[in-house]
Image: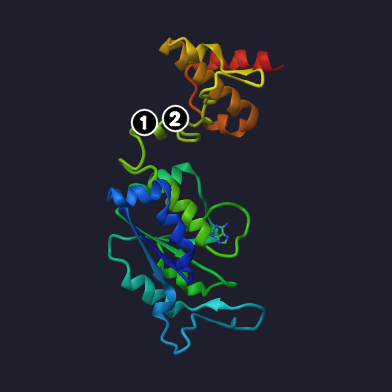
Amino acid sequence: MKITILTLFPQMFKGFVEESIIKRAIEKEVVEVKVVDIRDYSLNKHRHVDDTPCGGGAGMVLQVDVCHRAIKDNTNLNSHIVMMTPQGIKYDQKVAQRLAKEEDLVLLCGHYEGFDERIRDYVTEEISIGDYVLTGGEIPAMALADSVIRLLDHAIKEESHLDDSFSTGLLEYPQYTRPIEYENKKVPEVLLNGNHKEIKLFRKKEALRRTYLKRPDLLKDYNFSSEDKKLLDEIIKEEK
Ligand code: ADE
Protein backbone atom coordinates (compact mmCIF):
# COMPACT_ATOMS: atom_id res chain seq x y z
CA MET A 1 0.00 0.00 0.00
CA LYS A 2 1.04 3.57 -0.61
CA ILE A 3 -0.17 6.34 1.72
CA THR A 4 0.32 9.93 0.60
CA ILE A 5 -0.28 12.67 3.15
CA LEU A 6 -1.01 16.17 1.86
CA THR A 7 -0.28 18.66 4.63
CA LEU A 8 0.87 22.19 5.40
CA PHE A 9 3.01 20.81 8.25
CA PRO A 10 5.14 17.95 6.87
CA GLN A 11 7.53 18.13 9.84
CA MET A 12 4.76 16.83 12.10
CA PHE A 13 5.07 13.42 10.40
CA LYS A 14 8.80 12.98 11.07
CA GLY A 15 8.32 11.12 14.34
CA PHE A 16 5.43 9.14 12.90
CA VAL A 17 7.50 7.56 10.10
CA GLU A 18 10.74 7.28 12.05
CA GLU A 19 9.62 5.29 15.10
CA SER A 20 8.46 1.84 16.09
CA ILE A 21 6.07 -0.33 14.05
CA ILE A 22 5.43 2.25 11.32
CA LYS A 23 9.17 2.68 10.75
CA ARG A 24 9.60 -1.10 10.49
CA ALA A 25 6.61 -1.47 8.16
CA ILE A 26 8.19 1.12 5.84
CA GLU A 27 11.57 -0.64 5.98
CA LYS A 28 9.91 -4.00 5.20
CA GLU A 29 8.10 -2.32 2.26
CA VAL A 30 4.72 -3.24 3.71
CA VAL A 31 3.78 0.39 3.14
CA GLU A 32 5.25 3.43 1.45
CA VAL A 33 4.49 6.74 3.20
CA LYS A 34 4.95 9.93 1.20
CA VAL A 35 4.49 13.30 2.90
CA VAL A 36 3.73 16.19 0.55
CA ASP A 37 3.83 19.90 1.45
CA ILE A 38 0.68 21.53 0.06
CA ARG A 39 2.60 24.82 0.04
CA ASP A 40 4.71 23.49 -2.86
CA TYR A 41 1.58 23.92 -5.00
CA SER A 42 1.07 27.61 -4.22
CA LEU A 43 1.68 29.90 -7.19
CA ASN A 44 2.07 32.86 -4.85
CA LYS A 45 5.57 34.23 -4.38
CA HIS A 46 5.06 34.19 -0.60
CA ARG A 47 3.81 30.58 -0.84
CA HIS A 48 0.39 31.54 0.56
CA VAL A 49 -2.18 28.77 0.49
CA ASP A 50 -5.10 30.50 2.17
CA ASP A 51 -7.19 33.64 1.88
CA THR A 52 -9.89 35.49 3.81
CA PRO A 53 -13.44 34.07 3.73
CA CYS A 54 -15.74 35.41 1.02
CA GLY A 55 -18.57 37.27 2.76
CA GLY A 56 -16.31 38.19 5.68
CA GLY A 57 -15.69 36.62 9.05
CA ALA A 58 -12.73 35.53 11.12
CA GLY A 59 -9.90 33.23 10.08
CA MET A 60 -8.54 32.06 6.75
CA VAL A 61 -9.71 29.48 4.23
CA LEU A 62 -7.55 26.93 2.39
CA GLN A 63 -7.73 27.67 -1.34
CA VAL A 64 -9.33 25.20 -3.75
CA ASP A 65 -6.86 25.67 -6.63
CA VAL A 66 -3.78 25.00 -4.45
CA CYS A 67 -5.35 21.87 -2.95
CA HIS A 68 -6.57 20.63 -6.32
CA ARG A 69 -3.08 20.94 -7.84
CA ALA A 70 -1.64 18.99 -4.89
CA ILE A 71 -4.30 16.29 -5.31
CA LYS A 72 -3.90 16.02 -9.10
CA ASP A 73 -0.12 15.74 -8.86
CA ASN A 74 -0.25 12.96 -6.25
CA THR A 75 -3.14 10.75 -7.36
CA ASN A 76 -4.23 8.49 -10.19
CA LEU A 77 -7.59 6.91 -11.12
CA ASN A 78 -6.97 4.24 -8.49
CA SER A 79 -6.44 6.64 -5.57
CA HIS A 80 -8.82 6.74 -2.61
CA ILE A 81 -8.72 10.33 -1.40
CA VAL A 82 -9.78 11.05 2.18
CA MET A 83 -10.31 14.54 3.53
CA MET A 84 -9.73 14.73 7.30
CA THR A 85 -12.50 16.91 8.74
CA PRO A 86 -14.74 16.91 11.85
CA GLN A 87 -17.67 16.91 9.38
CA GLY A 88 -16.82 13.47 7.96
CA ILE A 89 -18.19 10.00 8.79
CA LYS A 90 -17.01 8.82 12.20
CA TYR A 91 -13.89 6.65 12.02
CA ASP A 92 -13.91 3.17 13.58
CA GLN A 93 -12.25 -0.23 13.18
CA LYS A 94 -14.65 -1.23 10.38
CA VAL A 95 -13.62 1.83 8.35
CA ALA A 96 -9.94 1.02 9.09
CA GLN A 97 -10.47 -2.52 7.73
CA ARG A 98 -12.15 -1.15 4.61
CA LEU A 99 -9.35 1.37 3.95
CA ALA A 100 -6.66 -1.29 4.55
CA LYS A 101 -7.82 -2.90 1.27
CA GLU A 102 -6.89 0.20 -0.78
CA GLU A 103 -3.71 0.25 -2.86
CA ASP A 104 -3.29 4.01 -2.97
CA LEU A 105 -4.61 6.03 -0.04
CA VAL A 106 -4.31 9.82 0.01
CA LEU A 107 -5.01 11.82 3.18
CA LEU A 108 -5.72 15.53 2.86
CA CYS A 109 -5.12 17.49 6.09
CA GLY A 110 -6.74 20.88 6.53
CA HIS A 111 -5.79 23.70 8.85
CA TYR A 112 -6.93 27.24 9.58
CA GLU A 113 -10.66 27.87 9.59
CA GLY A 114 -11.30 25.21 7.01
CA PHE A 115 -11.30 24.20 3.40
CA ASP A 116 -12.88 26.07 0.52
CA GLU A 117 -16.16 24.16 0.08
CA ARG A 118 -15.29 23.25 -3.54
CA ILE A 119 -12.35 21.06 -2.41
CA ARG A 120 -14.98 18.47 -1.41
CA ASP A 121 -15.59 17.79 -5.13
CA TYR A 122 -12.07 16.36 -5.50
CA VAL A 123 -12.07 13.81 -2.67
CA THR A 124 -13.55 10.30 -2.38
CA GLU A 125 -14.81 10.68 1.18
CA GLU A 126 -14.58 12.75 4.36
CA ILE A 127 -13.57 11.20 7.69
CA SER A 128 -13.67 12.46 11.29
CA ILE A 129 -11.81 10.71 14.11
CA GLY A 130 -14.43 11.79 16.65
CA ASP A 131 -16.78 14.52 17.77
CA TYR A 132 -14.14 17.02 18.84
CA VAL A 133 -12.19 19.62 16.89
CA LEU A 134 -8.41 19.54 16.56
CA THR A 135 -6.28 22.39 15.25
CA GLY A 136 -5.72 20.47 12.03
CA GLY A 137 -6.05 17.20 10.16
CA GLU A 138 -2.48 16.00 10.85
CA ILE A 139 -3.13 14.13 14.12
CA PRO A 140 -6.32 12.59 12.66
CA ALA A 141 -4.33 11.53 9.54
CA MET A 142 -1.69 9.91 11.78
CA ALA A 143 -4.37 8.08 13.79
CA LEU A 144 -5.98 6.83 10.59
CA ALA A 145 -2.68 5.84 8.91
CA ASP A 146 -1.44 4.08 12.05
CA SER A 147 -4.61 2.03 12.47
CA VAL A 148 -4.61 1.08 8.76
CA ILE A 149 -0.90 0.19 8.55
CA ARG A 150 -1.04 -2.22 11.51
CA LEU A 151 -3.75 -4.17 9.66
CA LEU A 152 -1.57 -4.72 6.57
CA ASP A 153 -0.05 -8.17 6.03
CA HIS A 154 3.34 -8.50 7.75
CA ALA A 155 3.13 -5.13 9.58
CA ILE A 156 2.75 -6.94 12.92
CA LYS A 157 2.63 -10.63 13.85
CA GLU A 158 -0.17 -12.24 11.83
CA GLU A 159 -2.35 -13.22 14.77
CA SER A 160 -1.81 -9.98 16.73
CA HIS A 161 -4.82 -8.11 15.40
CA LEU A 162 -7.26 -11.04 15.30
CA ASP A 163 -8.20 -10.47 18.96
CA ASP A 164 -8.05 -6.66 18.79
CA SER A 165 -10.69 -4.72 20.62
CA PHE A 166 -13.53 -4.01 18.13
CA SER A 167 -12.40 -6.42 15.38
CA THR A 168 -14.08 -9.33 17.19
CA GLY A 169 -17.00 -7.06 18.09
CA LEU A 170 -15.84 -7.13 21.74
CA LEU A 171 -13.17 -5.33 23.77
CA GLU A 172 -9.95 -7.32 24.04
CA TYR A 173 -9.49 -9.77 26.95
CA PRO A 174 -7.07 -8.78 29.80
CA GLN A 175 -3.38 -9.68 29.36
CA TYR A 176 -0.76 -10.47 32.02
CA THR A 177 2.97 -11.19 32.16
CA ARG A 178 5.61 -11.78 34.85
CA PRO A 179 5.81 -11.12 37.79
CA ILE A 180 3.11 -13.66 38.61
CA GLU A 181 2.36 -11.78 41.84
CA TYR A 182 2.70 -8.02 42.38
CA GLU A 183 1.53 -6.15 45.49
CA ASN A 184 -0.81 -9.03 46.32
CA LYS A 185 -2.32 -8.98 42.84
CA LYS A 186 -2.01 -12.39 41.20
CA VAL A 187 -2.21 -13.45 37.58
CA PRO A 188 -5.39 -15.57 37.20
CA GLU A 189 -4.54 -19.22 37.90
CA VAL A 190 -6.13 -20.49 34.67
CA LEU A 191 -3.49 -18.66 32.58
CA LEU A 192 -0.70 -20.60 34.29
CA ASN A 193 -1.93 -24.17 33.88
CA GLY A 194 -1.32 -24.58 30.13
CA ASN A 195 -4.85 -25.86 29.43
CA HIS A 196 -5.56 -24.11 26.13
CA LYS A 197 -9.27 -24.90 26.06
CA GLU A 198 -9.75 -23.38 29.53
CA ILE A 199 -7.61 -20.37 28.62
CA LYS A 200 -9.66 -19.74 25.49
CA LEU A 201 -12.91 -19.93 27.48
CA PHE A 202 -11.51 -17.61 30.19
CA ARG A 203 -10.46 -15.06 27.58
CA LYS A 204 -13.82 -15.16 25.82
CA LYS A 205 -15.64 -14.68 29.12
CA GLU A 206 -13.41 -11.80 30.23
CA ALA A 207 -13.73 -10.10 26.81
CA LEU A 208 -17.50 -10.36 27.21
CA ARG A 209 -17.31 -9.11 30.83
CA ARG A 210 -15.27 -6.04 29.86
CA THR A 211 -17.55 -5.20 27.01
CA TYR A 212 -20.63 -5.67 29.23
CA LEU A 213 -19.15 -3.40 31.94
CA LYS A 214 -17.35 -0.78 29.84
CA ARG A 215 -19.03 -0.69 26.42
CA PRO A 216 -22.46 -2.35 26.65
CA ASP A 217 -23.43 -0.48 23.46
CA LEU A 218 -21.14 -2.82 21.46
CA LEU A 219 -23.19 -5.86 22.51
CA LYS A 220 -26.18 -4.60 20.48
CA ASP A 221 -24.38 -5.52 17.24
CA TYR A 222 -22.57 -8.60 18.56
CA ASN A 223 -23.39 -12.02 17.10
CA PHE A 224 -23.88 -14.22 20.20
CA SER A 225 -23.17 -17.96 19.97
CA SER A 226 -25.02 -20.19 22.46
CA GLU A 227 -21.78 -20.41 24.48
CA ASP A 228 -21.54 -16.59 24.53
CA LYS A 229 -25.12 -16.33 25.81
CA LYS A 230 -24.36 -18.76 28.63
CA LEU A 231 -21.20 -16.85 29.56
CA LEU A 232 -23.00 -13.51 29.56
CA ASP A 233 -25.74 -14.90 31.84
CA GLU A 234 -23.01 -16.02 34.26
CA ILE A 235 -21.33 -12.59 34.08
CA ILE A 236 -24.59 -10.73 34.74
CA LYS A 237 -25.16 -12.88 37.88
CA GLU A 238 -21.54 -12.42 39.02
CA GLU A 239 -21.61 -8.65 38.56
CA LYS A 240 -24.90 -8.10 40.45
N1 ADE B 1 -9.65 18.14 11.82
C1 ADE B 1 -9.96 18.80 12.95
N2 ADE B 1 -10.67 18.03 13.78
C2 ADE B 1 -10.81 16.81 13.16
C3 ADE B 1 -11.44 15.60 13.51
N3 ADE B 1 -12.10 15.44 14.66
N4 ADE B 1 -11.37 14.57 12.63
C4 ADE B 1 -10.73 14.72 11.45
N5 ADE B 1 -10.13 15.85 11.06
C5 ADE B 1 -10.16 16.90 11.91
| Vertical relation: 186 (above or below) 21 | above
Q: Is residue 24 left or right of residue 177?
A: left
Nearest the viewer among 208 and 117 is: 208
In the picture, the quarter occupied by the C terminus is top right
Q: Which of 118 and 174 lies nearest the eye of the viewer?
A: 174
Density class for disc 1 (Cα within 10 Å; few <14, some 14-19, many ≥20) is: few
Nearer to me, 184 or 64: 184
Q: Name the residue tied to disc 2.
A: 163
Which residue shows up at 45% across the image and 55% down it? 16
Q: State the SS at label 2.
A: loop
Answer left or right for 52 relative to 83. Answer: right
Q: Which residue is drawn at 27% across and 51% down?
A: 29
Percent from the top left, x then y, of residue 226?
49, 14
CB at disc 2 and ligand 1 closer than 8 Å? no
Find residue 230 and report its image quarter.
Answer: top right
Q: Which amino acid does label 1 sit on?
A: Glu
Label ID, residue 159: 1
| In front of the other: 230 or 103 | 103
**Residue 196 rendering spot, x and y as whole percentages:** 41, 13
Q: Look at 46% across and 11% down and name the residue there.
A: 198
Q: Quadrant of ligand 1?
A: bottom right
Indicate the position of residue 28 as horizontal and vertical percent values. 28, 48
Q: Name the side, left or right, on which 22 lies relative to 178.
A: left
Do tag 2 and tag 1 residues touch (Cβ < 8 Å)? yes
